[in-house]
Amino acid sequence: MQSILFVLVPAIPLFFGAWFLFARRFRAAAAGAGLALCFAAVAALTITGDGVQTLFSVAPGVTFMFQSDGAGRLFGLLFSGVFMAAGFYALTYFKHEKNPARFFAFYFFSLFALMCLCLAGSLLTMYLCFETLTLCSFPMVLYDRTKEAVAAGIKYLLYSIAGAMMGLFGVIYLTLHTTSPTFVAGGSLTAELLADPPALLLIALFVCILGFGTKAGLFPMHGWLPTAHPIAPTPASAVLSGVIVNAGVLCIFRVIYFAAGTEAMRGSWVQTALLSLSLLTVLIGSAQALRQKHIKRRLAYSTVSQISYILFGLFLLQSAAAEGALLHTVFHSVMKTCLFLCAGALIVYGGTADVDEMRGIGKIMPVTMWCFTVAGVGLVGIPPLSGFLSKWVLARGAVQSGMPVFYWLGPVVLLVSALLTAGYIAPVVLTAFFPGDAAVSLRARRAPVGMIVPLCILAALALLFGLYSVPLRNAVDTILRALL
Amino acid sequence: MQGNVWLMIAAALPMLGAPVAYGLGRGRPRRALLIMAAVSAATLALLSVLLVQTIQGQTSAFAWAHFSVMGLALAADGFTALLSWLAALLFTVAAMFSLSYFKNKTSVPRYAFFTLTTLSAVIGVFLSDQLLTTIVFFEVMSLVSYPWVAHEETPGALRAAQTYLWIAVIGGLCLLIGMLLLPHELLSLRYSMGFAMTEGIEPSRLMLPAALMLVGFGAKAGAFPLHVWLPKAHPVAPAPASALLSGMLLKTGVFGIALLSVKFLREIAAWHALIFWIGVITMVVGAVLALLAVEMKRILACSSMSQIGFIMLGVGLFGLLLEHGGGAMQGFVSHMVNHALFKLILFLCAGAVAMRRHSLNLNDIRGFGRGKPLLHALFLAGMLGITGVPLFPGFASKTLLHEALTEYIHLSGGAWTYAATEWLFILTGALTVAYMLKLYVCLFWERGAEDETKNPSFSKGSAALLSLCAAAVLAVGLFPSAILGGIGRLSAGFFHVEVEPIRVYTTEALANAVISIGVGLLIYLLAVRVWLSEKTADGRVYVDRKPTWMDLEETAYRPLMKGLTAAVGACFWLVASLPELAIAGGRRMLLHVRAWRVPMPGGNRFTMAVGGFLNGAVALLNKTVRRRRPFEIDFSAALAAGNEELGQSMRKIKRSMSYSLLLFCLGLFGLLMYLMLW
């Protein structure tokens, strides 16, 4: 049963991607069915429990394998779920575009690469999937084929390849020095290395994490993110910002907690450097977002900032902080996807992408703006929305970790960043609902139901997770209990 | 979920009613308001039952462990049940008043929606039994009350609302971070189980978090120096909303501060002194601002700030006296209740004025109240109450506070700093008399434009309601020991203190009241009649003599925020661009690419040669075959332009390519070194 699912989970999106790549006509129903099927397959895999499946072996010791464990399933459910929501939105969004099949082909290929990444059972497999993901998702950035789109696409590609190369260095080092060919909870570094960690181990870890951090927009490799995300068509921006950045998070999570183990890093300069970089990124992202007028670019910078919250939580190597990080991965994914999808509706049906021109748009597109408000307020971290829960657990973990300096610097930076987040979210919401005497843009009209429904579902999730998230927290606790 | 579910229902009922009011009320403002009033009244009925139960000595609690981070815990004892009942009462009266207030006004369903949500949050704050629950409701309340201030959507209203929101957001985040830094055992404390034993904990570990939380609660209470939103928000909000802001929302801030004092920092004297001094400053500054103001609602708003100062002073005194603090506790609790009633009446009176005059500037409403006995009587009830005239409730609560103050001065050995506060206390009482007189004389005795409509100021329903409120005020004033004493006994459990029966009509108290009123009259005659107004042919004109530097928001906060945002933005822009600037610089030095030089328009030798050849061919053709319709293309220019375009895009690609190549090489280098050395 499980081995079938191991094949099915990646095969479903791969099949639909190939179909749309060569199909003459695009069938919306088929695309919708594909997304739902993929989600269902992951859900089925979740029920079947842990397992390992060897795929193929190119040389002794270089084996590619799939593995189903708690972390992979959590990310798999999240990725396929959010892809489903954004995909249903895209069905309506692309109704009037010329070539939806081309978009959906690469949308499904990206989903395929993500599913493989979630199932990846060893570092090498993970690296392979990571590269595949870059190659599959970059055509989505190119979709418009304008000069800027091409430039942004190339920037994305080159940054990602450079990042993957840096990652490869660490991957090879760690593969050679771990006792287990698969991911093991808590890491499987050889005993002599753990007893006396050489400088090269730390360098490899640092370079590797920085490399995978490229996808997650970690400073100094964040440059591509605010360029590439806003250029893509909205559903693609949404999954780039809401899902694909989390691929970087997953890789870093795997490297630290499943391959190298936390002991090698704890207290070393690598941890200090990474914590500093992540906090710096948090501030850079939100400060830059405040300066952007283009709504999608504003949201893209916000992603840079929010993902580094997650990385900060992971780098603290403390159970509560890591729990907060994983929760924030889920919640941020839901909220940011919702925000981007709202932004898309505002751009297409509101007639403007400039946040200053959205005065009074809340009176014409109330549901869209309400969803934007709920997700945005959640992103700031106002209780009782979900963003508050994850940030609270994370910050509480930082305080409890007792890391010198960071135990107070972390929460302070999170606070300042939350203020800046309020600074870039609140004006959009307020001018939309309280325009004053300014004329309302006449071109705006209501978004169609097909786009509204996914928005509402995501916004409702952002609220409900905040009110009640015991099953999710239990799942995350189970994952982390084996690690720390 | 366990315990008394009715607590949760009471807190959630208005929030559930809010979408109903909005949905059914769209396009039908009156229906929205009716639903709002009905839901508020239902909540009031529920809470009345609860209050009666607690008076009979029966406390109840509710807990839902799976809510949000640490669960949700509610409990009702005497004090909290009283406050939440009072909140529901005020919201109900304001809702009924708004039925006549909002005639022909837009955005009413929105108002109903957010008012009901706010009611839920306020009840939640009062009934909460755990810090996190308090703060969740508090944050929700801060945000959903924003539409009250922004309701009119005039530029002034939007600006005031902006201030309101930012102070609420900053305050809210300070609350959260303060709570984050609290020791863990305090976070899970249930208020109904007692207070935190902080003996083993360093006071410094508590003072920093508590100070941060004070920012949050103090901002909502309107404590100096975070009061700036208060005098601006009240005048622009609709009158029922102003009444609720002053009557209830400020009290939630004070409630938060009292909570910290009573439950968390009970044994830390420095904290209580801090609250005391903030109270003193707020009390005096508020009264001075009220005296200087020339707008009816602004006077009332600044007056609220001053009265909050009285209450905070009482909270501070209670903490300083602790086991002797029964009198102080009774004083500030009764003042909380009294002030809610006064301000309800006074702001709704202002609403009645605003419905006719559309401006509340003192010079526009001169003599409005002449020939309106009901308005006159209601206003007098509120005014005599707040100024502390004997036989009215303000006298009783202020006397209790004054007695506590003298007791503390006596206990502390007569330190001059505290002795001076006694004079400030009396002076503020006098200022209260002066600014209320200013308003009263202007409204009811001076001559101004005749009221063109002879309609009554209130609809029958709101007249009856307000008369009831005024009657309540009179009753409290006439029987202070029964009613206020009862309130004190009810609250004693929450504050863990013994109370004695109160006696307010002593010769000393009466003498103090006479002094206070006398000085107040003197200030009125000297300051208001001489300095703050001028006599013209048109009657007395009130002049705004408030110096501009006194507006802390405009002189300090806004420039500071602007400067900080700009500086932080510029700083982080630089940091964020560092990697790419480094690439550009590195390329220039290492690879000799002159990226900064603007390339000359034009082609290279190849394009010149090809272009020249093609140009020659075309010229030949033009002279021979195409003499009639010659080609008009300059091939060398066109090719040069094409070449330029190609070059530019290539350069763009190379710029990022070289970066990744650089990194690629670094990675490869590391790999090779590793393979060679190990």
Image: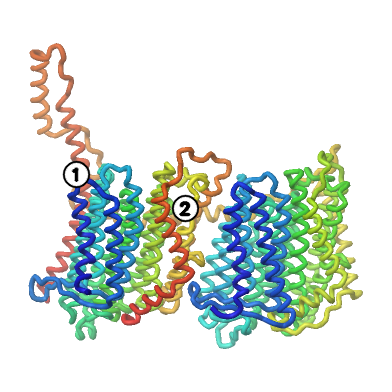
Query: Left or right of A295: which side holds B201?
Result: right
**Could you tell me residue A390's position as x and y percent?**
43, 70
Residue B357 to residue B426: above or below: above
Q: Amino acid at mark 1?
A: Met
Element carrying mark 1: helix
Identity of the residue drawn at 79% across and 44% down: B363
Confirm whether residue B584 shows in the render.
no
From where the camera sits, is residue A324 visible? yes
**What amino acid is at disc 2?**
Ala
Percent of width and height locating residue A140:
26, 51
Viewer-proximal residue, A61 or B177? A61
Frontmost residue, B381 versus A81: A81
> Residue A232 placed where, x, y %?
30, 49
**Of labels 2 and 1, the one closer to you:** 1
Q: Write the residue at 84% across / 63% down.
A: B471
Residue B665 numbered tag: none
Percent coordinates x, y for residue B235 in the rendering: 69, 51
Query: Would you call the spot at circle 1 few (<14 residues within 10 Å), some (14-19), or many (20 or more)?
Result: few
- The alpha-carbon separation of the residues under discs 2 and 1 comes to 36 Å
Mark 1 — residue? B650
Q: What number of labels is visible? A: 2
**Disc 2 packing (10 Å; few <14; some 14–19; many ≥20):** some
Q: Which mark is residue B566?
A: 2
Q: Say which quarter of the image contains residue B121.
A: bottom right
Q: Earlier in the sequence, mark 2 or mark 1?
A: 2
